[in-house]
Amino acid sequence: MTSNINVGLTNVGPETHPLTWRYTKAGKSVLTIEDYEALEGYSALKKAVAMQPTDVQAEVKASNLRGRGGAGFPTGVKWSLIPMGPDAGQKYLVCNADEMEPGTFKDRFLMEELPHQLVEAMITAAYAIGASKGYIFLRGEYIIAGERLNAAIQQATKAGYIGENILGSGFNFELHVHLGAGRYICGEETALINCLEGRRANPRTKPPFPQQAGAWGKPTIVNNVETLMNIPAILLRGADWFKGLSQGKSPDAGTKMYGISGRAKITGLWELPIGTTGRELLYTHGGGMADGYELSCWLPGGASTDFLMPEHLDLAMDYDTIMKAGSRMGTALIMVVDDKQNIISAVRNLEQFFARESCGWCTPCRDGLPWTVKILESIEAGEGQEGDIATLQQLTRFLGPGKTFCAHAPGAMEPLQSALKFFPAEFAKGIKA
């Protein structure tokens, strides 16, 4: 089994890879502003500032770009909800780069290898929504990404792409990297905003949504790294070009950073048309399961998604198809579970992570997740009591959507509820006779 980063190197030309074509064409990281400009770098920004901000918004909306952080909300629609015009006042653009989902590493790759593409994307997006300040909220452990982003910001400032009167447009923008202290809940946009303000990273009540009252009470847009890094290509090539990149595999538009972790022969990342099936991802790009192992089940998009089974591999990996199958595409970095893995141990490990990362704001999450872990530990040790499985099933409902303050606990319940559905015999083995 090998483990490395693979980014669609063997597929098609650069025009079909809005996220990684510069990396593949250069054959290496693109770190300096000179190398980036030689690959059409900052051309999208130059095009954007010659347009009206609302026209930039309209182009992104027409592209049907959906948020790549997991929720899949249309990016152009989110942007259109922010107040515009001379009376709109101070606004902020925040990049969610707090990538802590177990098994997910796509944003790290993009930021480390193509930092200027994120910087250009943020300047362009800020222009479109009229934000004069931007923050990249970065996972603290991503030290290399932080160094390269800060260097890119310095170079872009020196070149006149950041600062006052950018490219003579009258647009002013400043951009900062903010290192987070490492909390999973900071992936939730209002918890992220609280943390950015120096507060405890607890989620806020919605409404109001950040588009109306976000950072420091001002209108704020929060977008994920991968989402933003599609923006330059959409502006350069157009919305219709972007929509065609899915090659008919899905009603969704563009490409997606797909990945594999677990006992596959090849683990890594690939930028592929959105709607690529799990089977193509695992068996064509990932080379199949490692020798001696069979696929038992898989998580389609990180730890907070429901398990799917081998018979689901032929489904298109897009937001709506995976949801109809009973799970979520999430980050689209699949975790494969092999036939030799104890599924109870796998689920207990995930629930321990979620229990540790609970912010403790609401009782069901704060107390329910440790209770879940305790029961799973008993079943894993063969010491489960009669009624434990029924209690776990109750917990998946009591900690489900609408029962907690945010989506942390409901996300934690997804792998558990699907494991209870697909592997009832494994749970029953852990109950004492």
Image (spheres, rainbow, N blue to C red):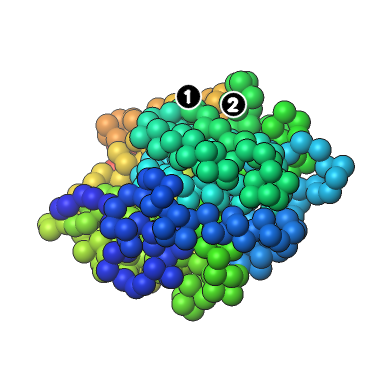
Kind of residue at badge 1: Ala
Work out whether residue 325 can be spotted: no
Could you tell me residue 249's position as x and y percent?
A: 46, 75
- Give the quadrant of residue 80: bottom right
216 and 297: which one is in front? 216
138 and 165: which one is in front? 165
Could you tell me residue 330's position as x and y percent?
A: 48, 52
Q: Residue at x 83, y 42 (%)?
A: 88
Marking on residue 67: none
Q: Decide: marks 2, 1 in contact (CB < 8 A)?
A: yes
Kind of residue at badge 2: Cys
Marking on residue 195: 2
Answer left or right for 431 relative to 364: left
Q: Residue at x 27, y 31 (%)?
A: 381
Q: Residue furthest left?
A: 292
Answer left or right for 121 relative to 292: right
For marks 2 and 1 on the same chain, the one whose residue lies earlier in the sequence: 1
Mark 1 lies on a secondary structure that is loop
Q: CA distance from mark 2 to mark 1?
A: 9 Å
The residue pinned by badge 1 equals 181
For disc 2, the neighbor class at 10 Å (few under 14, some 14 to 19, many from 20) is many
Quadrant the C terminus occupies: top left
- Give the quadrant of residue 286: bottom left
Answer left or right for 288 relative to 376: left
Q: Residue at x 43, y 70 (%)?
A: 16
